[in-house]
Amino acid sequence: MDRLCHTRLLLILDDVDEWNQIENLLGRCDWFSSGSRIIITTRDKQVVTTLGKDHLVYEVKKLNQCEAHELFSLHTFQMNKPGEDYLEVAKQIIHYANGLPLALKIIGSDLCGKSIHEWENALEKYKSIPHKKIQEKLKISYDGLEKTEKDIFLHVSCFFKGFEKDYVTNILETCNLYPRDGICKLIDKCLITVDQWGILSMHDLLQQMGREIVQQEFENPENRSRIWCYEDAYEVLTRNMGTDKIQAMILRSPELVTMKLQSEPFERMKNLKFLLVENVHICEEFQYLPNGLRLLEWHKFPFSWPSKYCPQKLVTLHMSWSSRIRMEKIFKQV
């Protein structure tokens, strides 16, 4: 402090994740010479909030299309724009990266010097299996979360992206996840966003990371905590492979299909909390749904209310156009 307090400084602290890192190095930040500038980069907005109000906060935005094209081209062709032959597949890769500089640099460097055919193969792979180096960087913020915050993040990435924040908060509160605090923490760490209409969202690659974390839990889908892929849900239900590990399931077909189920497909899913069924017609009537369901969305439900289901913990029910459901019976059970 004695040596530097009379000198104008440009000081850059990169990738700060805790306030005490700043405090230990700089103290209260009130001793710098006039004209000095301190730049701090962080993944956590709360770190700079603790500095007080006498500073400027700049939230880094994702790259626009022109900037993304330029950055990607610099790493693949060492020039500002892709070669004419590569233009179409380059657009697809840039769309996949969705303005994230990290992804553009890593993928661009990997594809440098490779053929168009290799580019196309790599892109198809990345859509299903995320790039390891990108995942490792993005996962740093996730690894620093508390257990309840990790659960909220995974629920949003696998189930609740695109839902209204207050709606999701009301549901997750009944799961003892403390979402009012947890969602704010995820926003501060830039893992999720809330738009002007109150809708929860996240970057596509963060969503892919969250889903990859769930897929890595177990090889077989029936042992994972969340199922959102139609093929996985179809396999679990038609083969009656449900387990008490499943917390959330989406059974959504791209087109209307008829499905035959065996026995009671939900009977072993004791911990199922969220169930969404769309565009699927079930042939055989069943009598059991888990009593711990918080959200049940099943439009055009073809049967009467399951006799062995008591919706004591249900928060949200969407069963429009389900002519055989008698609501007075449901309210009486509750």
Image (cartoon, rainbow, N blue to C red):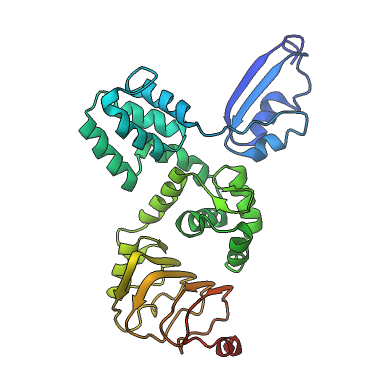
Up-down relation of residue 188 to residue 100 (above or below): below
Residue sitting at 40 percent across and 28 percent down? Answer: 105
Asked whether residue 1 appears in the rendered view, the answer is: yes
Of 221 and 217, the residue lying toward us: 221
Where residue 92 sits in the image (x, y, percent)? 35, 37
Q: Which part of the image, by quadrant, shows the C terminus?
A: bottom right
Where residue 5 sits in the image (x, y, percent)? 76, 13
Where residue 65 sits in the image (x, y, percent)? 46, 31
Up-down relation of residue 30 to residue 214 (above or below): above
Residue sitting at 61 percent across and 21 percent down? Answer: 12
Up-down relation of residue 87 to residue 31 (above or below): below
Residue sitting at 38 percent across and 62 percent down? Answer: 224
Asked where in the image residue 43 lies, by quadrant, the reply is top right
Of 109 and 51, the residue lying toward us: 109
Q: Is residue 222 left or right of residue 248?
A: left
Residue sitting at 58 percent across and 64 percent down? Answer: 172
- Disc tally is 0
Q: Which part of the image, by quadrant, shows the N terminus?
A: top right
Asked where in the image residue 114 lies, by quadrant, the reply is top left
Where residue 215 sits in the image (x, y, percent)? 36, 55
Q: Is residue 323 left or right of residue 259?
A: right
Up-down relation of residue 180 to residue 297 (above or below): above
Q: Is residue 274 left or right of residue 167?
A: left
Asked whether residue 177 appears in the rendered view, the answer is: no
